[in-house]
Image (cartoon, helix red, strand yellow):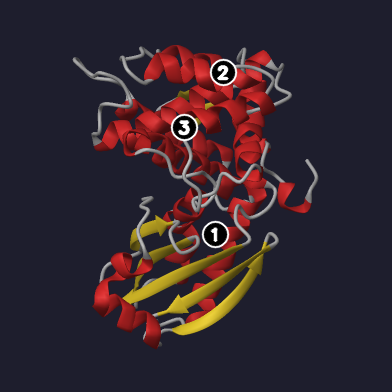
Amino acid sequence: MNRRKALRGLLGMAGMREVLRASSERVEVGGATLDVFISSDEFSLGSSALLEWVRRSATAVAAYFGQFPVSHARVYITVTQSGRVSSGVSYGDGGAHCRISVSRETTRDDLYRDWELTHEMVHFSFPSVDRRHHWIEEGIATYVEPIARASIGIVTAEQVWAEMRRDMPQGLPEAGDPGLDHTHTWGRIYWGGALFCLMADVEIRRRTRNAKGFRDALRAINRAGGTIEAEWPLEQALRIGDQATDGQTLTELYSKMASQPFAVDLGYLWRQLGVSENGQGIVLDDRAPWAGIREAICRAAKGKGKNHD
């Protein structure tokens, strides 16, 4: 979740006291410095496991973007008595920072499989836009997060596409839907936004013969100063992304999806990409017409944290 508020507003007075008591550690990843604040020493595996989690999540994001999206960020980890990894929120005011909660009994495997911290760090990569465009902020984080984790081997391409095939239908418009800028339901904000990103990725790659993709658009936006710390009109970000991908895909797709329902035939899309199920799990068909696009979407991030494809 991405919200722009001052740190005092984020944490409240009780939270401010918690931060002042927190231990602080520093992690260097992808050309960035992350200051990590841990609320207590009650985490059962010790602070080293939490720092490993932060480093792994940041490494995934840096792999996708070629470097970490901001040069400095703060991560506030609240250790709770029960629950799981939860309550992740990212902010830009006062510098990029996020807060997330972790149960004191969270296991090392839970941390390894977690997606929420990666999701929050992806938010650092895109400018804060008008409230009605919240779907693009959450859509990017929802779409990029599994691809970024796949780029460092946490999940497989099969898992990425299985999740998309399962969850993308939640982003489809329903009867009477007036478009992404006007329908503020959970499904349309998160998965409607992710569907925009997937459609943009596929169309950019079709138009450029797979030479460029949505990642190239996001990198250009980020390199131009479009981070969570900046406030931009959405049109500015889309224009920069289009320039970087030699077309008008983002602007055209936005005009189709912003103020009216846009019918996406997901069945056709999955067939073209070669993504299906056989009753036992996901099947990726390398003979499908757009199999190269599907493969490139998950391959695109690999190794870019070290500046090579």
Give the answer, above or below, for where 87 lies relative to 247: below
Residue type at mark 3 is: Leu
Q: Say which element carries label 2.
A: helix
Instruction: State which mark lies toward you, 2 or 1.
Output: 2
Disc number placed over residue 282 in the picture, else none: none
Left or right of 190, for residue 46: right
Q: How many numbered marks have been drawn onto this rendered protein structure? A: 3
Given contact means CB atoms under 8 Å apart, are the residues at marks 1 and 3 in contact?
no
Instruction: Give how far apart the Cα atoms at labels 3 and 2 are.
Output: 14 Å
- Residue with the mark numbered 1: 57
Instruction: Give how far apart the Cα atoms at labels 2 and 1 are.
Output: 30 Å
Residue type at mark 1 is: Ser
Give the answer, above or below, for where 163 lies relative to 257: below
Q: Residue at x 42, y 71 (%)?
A: 76
Q: Who is closer to the viewer here, 51 or 282?
A: 51
Question: How far across and how far down the image is residue 95, in percent?
Answer: 50, 62
Give the answer, above or below, for where 250 lies relative to 59: above
- Residue with the mark numbered 2: 249
User: Nearer the N terminus, badge 2 or badge 1?
Assistant: 1
- Residue with the mark numbered 3: 234
Q: Residue at x 35, y 74 (%)?
A: 78
